[in-house]
Amino acid sequence: GAVVSQHPSRVICKSGTSVKIECRSLDFQATTMFWYRQFPKQSLMLMATSNEGSKATYEQGVEKDKFLINHASLTLSTLTVTSAHPEDSSFYICSATNTGSQETQYFGPGTRLLVL
Amino acid sequence: GNSVTQMEGPVTLSEEAFLTINCTYTATGYPSLFWYVQYPGEGLQLLLKATKADDKGSNKGFEATYRKETTSFHLEKGSVQVSDSAVYFCALRRNSGNTPLVFGKGTRLSVIA
């Protein structure tokens, strides 16, 4: 089946630093990828829609300058948390839909970010 | 707007018990409905889905039927196993275009031997 990977799986950083999270579709091309955030014991909240070759679309309340998204190729989208603060600590999950078959979204395993 | 409401957990059951996790939705138009499962330490996996009214999705002994009249998509399994312990998310997605999923809050299931 389709596989989506994320790297790193876990990261701990100091407050004020920037962290980049990669999301890759390993065996299919994805024109669109989605970035979600999951707080402990809560649901996944959509942060932004990442479109290959164009600017990302952010959900209301999500700061685009804080969460930079780059979808440079059909298999890679990156989320950079800039000047991270403890309140940014969360579980970040990406998903991708096979361009050729837009029915099912495949999720990455998630990246747990802890900002000290 | 679109939203999903599912029963709050945690739910604790004995092995071989019957499972029901309720899910209702609010949506414009006719969305596709999904159940995702998140095992401890892993990412979300699609468990089953239904794309139109009266469709029944099924997988690994789990079933859910798309009920348009009650806007529901309840998850059921006749006999749960310890390995079913996980968090279950109900979700919907508009059928037009490549759109993101809208999730419920998730229900944690613990099955004890």
Image (cartoon, coloured by chain):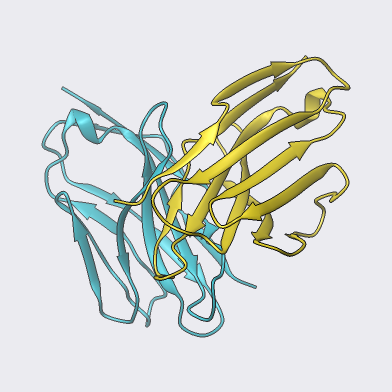
Residue at 35% of width from left, 66% of height from top?
B73
Residue at 80% of width from left, 23% of height from top?
A86
Is A59 situated left or right of A8 in this image? right
User: How far across and down, in percent of the image, does residue B16 sit?
Assistant: 11, 36
Residue B104 in sight here: no
Q: How many marks?
A: 0
Outermost residue toward the front in this view: A73
Which chain: yellow?
A
Instruction: Work out which quarter of the rendered image holds the C terminus of chain B and state it.
Output: top left
Residue at 88% of width from left, 22% of height from top?
A16
Frontmost residue, A103 versus A90: A103
Quadrant of res B50:
bottom left
User: How far across and down, in percent of the image, does residue A1 sit?
Assistant: 29, 51
Residue B23 in sight here: yes
Frontmost residue, B42 versus A68: A68
- In the rendered view, tell whether residue A66 sits above or below residue A98: above
- In the rendered view, tell whether residue B11 sits above or below residue A63: above
Is B68 situated left or right of B61 in this image? right
Instruction: Work out which quarter of the rendered image holds the N terminus of chain B and state it.
Output: bottom right
Residue at 50% of width from left, 55% of height from top?
A96
User: How far across and down, in percent of the image, does residue B13 sit?
Assistant: 24, 33
Chain B on-screen colour: cyan
